[in-house]
Amino acid sequence: MNFEVLENAWQKQTVTGGGEPADAVATRLKREVEIAQRRIRGGIALVTCVLLTGWTVAIVGHITAIKRFTPVGLIAEVVYFILVVAFLVRAFRSARVVRNEMAMMGGTLPESLGATLRTVELQIQNARIAGYAIPIVVGVCIWLFVAKYLAGELPGFGAVAGSVFMAFFGAVIGVIIWRRYRTQLAPRREELEEMMQALDRNESV
């Protein structure tokens, strides 16, 4: 079996062992999936912490009469909660998919490459979802700032400052995601697809 494509991709390391991946290749593939898994877990932990902190502050503020719940404020908290839950649902689903792909690592070379490729494709899908979701979330947050201003719960400066911050924050996150897609995920998917095609051609010979 000719592994020239894989040798070039993995810095001229030789793949041996018939249909089994070489240690160097298997280690690189497994590390790549593990990094994706850590990213997802980190996102889940961060968002969960933000959610719990936000609700804790809101409840304590209401109990101590520092800031009572109002209809607009309660609607805002519910909307934020729904947005966070939607993120967590997608994140937990992604974590489950990556965990399943981890179970495929260490098998034959096509299995390991396939698991890595599916993990990269999952991250690309998440990036695309974020590309649609970020403008919606920013728009909702700005609308809530305006609603609080109209209800007299937020001064005009606060509404403007909050809206500008959300727009800026959303733009920064969007640029980071887009840059990672263009410079890392898309090229990596192309590289893995070429490896899979090379293996298919070699096995058909």
Image (cartoon, helix red, strand yellow):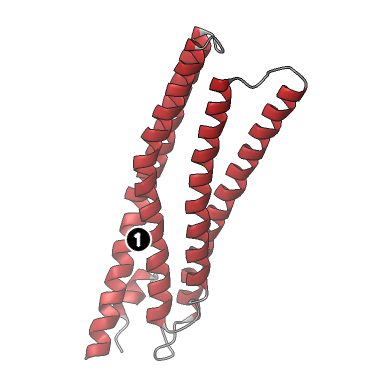
Q: As displayed, is residue 121 above or below residue 15?
A: above
Task: Judge by depth and name the residue closer to the eye, 165 or 179.
Answer: 165
One can see residue 43 in this view? yes
Write the residue at 49% across / 46% down.
Answer: 87
Write the residue at 48% across / 19% down.
Answer: 145
Task: Judge by depth and name the residue closer to the eye, 141 or 157.
Answer: 141
Q: Quadrant of the N terminus?
A: bottom left
Image spot of residue 170 (x, y percent)? 43, 32
Q: Quadrant of the C terminus?
A: bottom left
> Which residue is under mark 1?
188
Disc 1 is placed on an element classified as: helix
Write the residue at 78% across / 21% down.
Answer: 64
Residue at the outermost right position: 64
Q: As displayed, is residue 186 above or below residue 24?
A: above
Image spot of residue 137 (x, y percent)? 43, 34
The image quarter containing residue 155 is top right
Image spot of residue 114 (x, y percent)? 38, 73
Badge 1 amino acid: Arg
Image spot of residue 148 (x, y percent)? 51, 16
The image quarter containing residue 140 is top left
One can see residue 14 in this view? no
